[in-house]
Every structure is written in structure tokens, then in C-alpha cells.
Image (cartoon, rainbow, N blue to C red):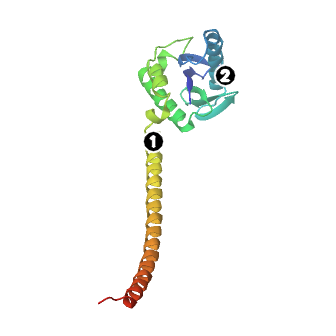
Amino acid sequence: MKLYYIGIFRNSTKPAVELCAAKDLSSFSFFEKKSVGEFLTFFGTTVAERTAPSQRQSVEENEYIAHTYARSDGVAGVIIADKEYPIRVAYSLLNKLLDQFLTQFPRGQWSQGDVKLQFTELESSLAKYQNPHQADSIMRVQQELDETKIVLHKAIESVLQRGEELDSLVAKSSALSTTSKMFYKEAKKTNSCCIIA
């Protein structure tokens, strides 16, 4: 699971304008970084531009998927990740970031012209949400539940295994008990004929 890009766009005009963005290109070589960065920006711009207000959509392109949320007030958030990244986490992050963006930057600061804003929350969220299980509380609880379930299954299996071992010991002791009773009777018969006084 990998997050590559988070961007916020003004999509009330065509073409959409990237207001701020954060990219993680660390998994690409030096020679690929520039072209991959340009592709991510182009992909994000295209998807933001084509997402209707108050809509969410996910668009696949090769091994990437762009999750987009366009709000009715003219901004859209785009997350580009690999296909394994959880959709619910991506959309909850977009919702949170767009709320913070609109709180920090009133409409007058981004509604006109080609504006680039410094929104540091994008960089920190890009780093924090690389591991969605740690960043998202619901995913963290789900992971803890899964781990607990595995431990419980192991405990139940070991209890069942012990139960099976106990059953076999009980069966063996029953067989031993029967055998020892027969041995006692035979020994008594043998000893009764050979009493020396």
C-alpha cells in the first residue's frame, strides 16, 4: 500500500487549477521522478476537472488509482495511490483535508487566478497515511481485532488438541485398567496354586 500524491484543486473552472499538492516519489529512480511527478499532476488535474460537484469517484490508470472528492464550494481533493490502498481511508483523509483547507484558506484566497498555497498538512498527511493501519483508527481497531481473532483461534486449537490428548489418555487408562485387572486375576490364580506353607 502506497500513497503517491495528495492534491487540492479549484475545479469550478476549466481547466482545474492545482492549489497545493504533496508527492512521494521516493520509490522511483532519479531519472523517473520528474516524469512521474508530471504524470501525477496531470492525472490529478484531469480527474478533479471531470468530477462533478458533491461527487466522489475512483479512477484507475495502470497500477494507480485516483480517489477524488469534489465539494460543492468549488474545491476538489485527489489522492493517487496504488490499487491496494483502502478506499475508505482515502476518502476519510480527503474529507478531513478539505475541511482543514477551507478553514485555513477562505474562498477569496483561491477562487481567482493561478494560485499556489502552502498547506503543510498535505506533507504530514502523506507521510502519516503511508501506513493506513496506523493512521486510521477504524483500520487500527480492525487490525487489532484480526490479531485477537488469530490468538483466540490458536488458543481454541490448543485447547482442542489438549482435549484430544486427554481423551486418548483416558482411553489408554481405561485399557490399562482393564489389562491390569486381568493381570491381577491371573497373578492371583497363578499364586493360589503355588502356595508354600
The image shows residue 166 at horizontal and vertical percentages of: 43, 66
Gap between marks 1 and 2, in whole Å?
31 Å
The amino acid type found where label 2 is placed reads Thr
Residue tagged 2: 46
Q: Nearer the viewer, mark 1 or mark 2?
A: 1
| Foreground residue among 103 and 139 | 139
* Side of 15 relative to 21 (left or right): right
Which SS class for mark 2?
A: helix
Image quadrant in which the N terminus is located: top right
Q: Is residue 13 left or right of residue 94?
A: right
Percent x, y for residue 197?
A: 29, 90
Q: Position of residue 131 (x, y in %)?
A: 49, 30
Q: Nearer the viewer, residue 106 or 190?
A: 190
Amino acid identity at mark 1: Ile
Vertical comparison of 57 with 104: above or below: below
Q: Pick out the residue farthest to the front.
A: 197
Task: Tell me the quarter of the picture where residue 70 sits.
Answer: top right
Q: Is residue 151 visible?
A: yes
Q: Which residue is mark 1?
A: 138
Residue 15 seen in the figure:
no
Q: Is residue 74 above or below residue 181?
A: above
Q: For label 2, count other residues whose C-alpha is less than 10 Å away and answer few (under 14), some (14-19) or many (20+).
A: some
Q: Nearer the viewer, residue 128 or 57?
A: 128
Q: How many marks?
A: 2
Mark 1 or 2, nearer chain start: 2
